[in-house]
Amino acid sequence: MSPKRNDFDPDILRMTKRHYRELLALLPEGVGITDLNENLVFVNDALAKILGYELEELRGMNILDLVSENGLDQIREESSKRQAGIPSVYETEVKHKDGRKIVVRVSAVPRRDENSNVIGTIAVLNDVTQEKLAEQELRKLSRAVEQSPASVVITDSEGIIEYVNPKFSVLTGYSFNEAVGKNPRILKTNLTPKETHKDLWRTLKDGQSWRGQFVNRKKDGDLYWEEAWISPIFTSEGNISHFVAVKQDITQRIMADRRAAQSHRDLELYASFLQHDIRNDLQVIMNHAEAALMLMEGESKVKGYIQTVEAASERMVHLLDVFGRPGAAEERDLISILESVKAHAVKTHSNLRVVIKSDLKRAELESARLIALVFDNLIRNSAKFSDGEAEVVIEVSQENGQIQTIFRDDGPGIPKEIIPSLFEKGASTTGGGFGLYLSKKVVEGYGGSIELIQDERGASFRILLPSS
């Protein structure tokens, strides 16, 4: 019978040491063994790969040479723990051979001799750089969602709420704890069409994103409108696990649109009344003026006054026509528009002479429905502020895809004190001050511009309008 071997058999010890070294060398985690001065006495292939060095380069290097400046104090503190016989797990920043900084998670224990004296450290290291970057991105995303000005709601695949951000609570009045575990139906009203909800679930179950609007109810009972973007979230196997909704409160926009629509309807009704009542009254004035002229014999001042009344009435009828005719029927040739404005202006103002100059046969604008009002206002101002005879010269040309109009009169010009606020509401020496303000609004509404040109005499303006 062979003698019994005990645990201290030299052959077994040699095998154990060999297996131990093989284990350390082949571990997928980085392994480093240091002496009391933190010099490396052993490294495995995995650690060399993590740091980007060859094995021979690392042996004998000091740990402090491999740690970034941000981690030096931490390593010194950890080394003192090891000398006191204390193990620990920590994360630190080390330097790759190519200069990159990487984050490693270290599990370190004291290394002892046969008498249990601490003679260094045995450490296992894992590269967690990508994990840390992912955590940073996750924290960044989390902060973005938490601080988002839009409501964010996450539900499970059955529509049960698992998360809401603070904006959701501010908007709806439901706290996080009140919302989680509930169905979004807590916000539902009968004002959202049933077909909207059906279309929503059909789209989501097909794995597609959905966008639409809801009329919802807050916790306090108030209604609000929101626009929602809802998308499914998939597992790695391609199954829907959750839904995420990003929702914007559009109540103010909806209410503004409704007010604008109502104002538009009111304006249409008001315009209809103007078309009917004012046109009828103007027709009465024109008929009586015509009758009075027929009864008068010879020339007189009274006859001139009546002719002015008749011309002014015709001009007002023309302006009503501008507002009343359908948009498709508008005149867009600026030359024709100016000729028409001129004809009405000289009949109304006996002291006025208007000259239109252009090398263009037609000057077609993209849109010009109210442009006649702009030139009518400018011409009337020229006649109004002239001391005697007034002459207006209008030059039309093509400039870089735009129609340029230079308007000049020979009157007294614009007072210097008014020039800085010329196109502002109320800028006038005689009260009112709406003509140039409204003219600028009309021109800019058509994508153009109007500006005052400083000439030696008179008032001069440059008007640019998009050509068709």
Image: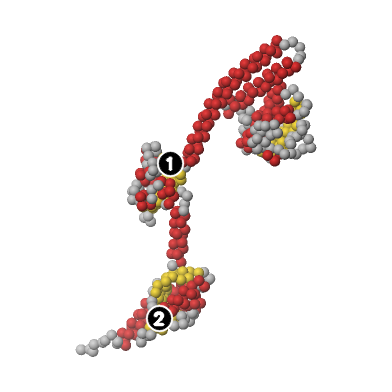
Q: Does residue 25 appear to the left or right of 407 in the view shown?
A: left
Q: Residues within 10 Å of mark 1 (few under 14, many from 20)?
A: some
Pointer 2 or 1: first along the chain: 2
Q: Quadrant of residue 340?
A: top right
Residue named by callout 2: 84
Q: Position of residue 81 (x, y in %)?
A: 41, 78
Q: CA distance from mark 2 to mark 1?
A: 65 Å
Work out whether residue 48 can be spotted: no
Colour mapping used in the image = secondary structure
Q: Quadrant of the C terminus?
A: top right
**Farthest residue toward the left?**
1
Residue named by callout 1: 224
Q: Secondary structure at mark 1?
A: strand
Determine whether 341 is above or below 90 in the image.
above
Q: Secondary structure at mark 2?
A: loop
Q: How many marks?
A: 2
Q: Residue at x 41, y 49 (%)?
A: 169
Q: Does residue 145 appear to the left or right of 391 in the view shown?
A: left
**Farthest residue toward the right?**
456
Q: Nearer the viewer, residue 30 or 252?
A: 252
Q: Residue at x 37, y 55 (%)?
A: 235
Kindly identify the amino acid type of the residue bearing the numbered disc 2: Ala
Q: Residues within 10 Å of mark 2 (few under 14, many from 20)?
A: few
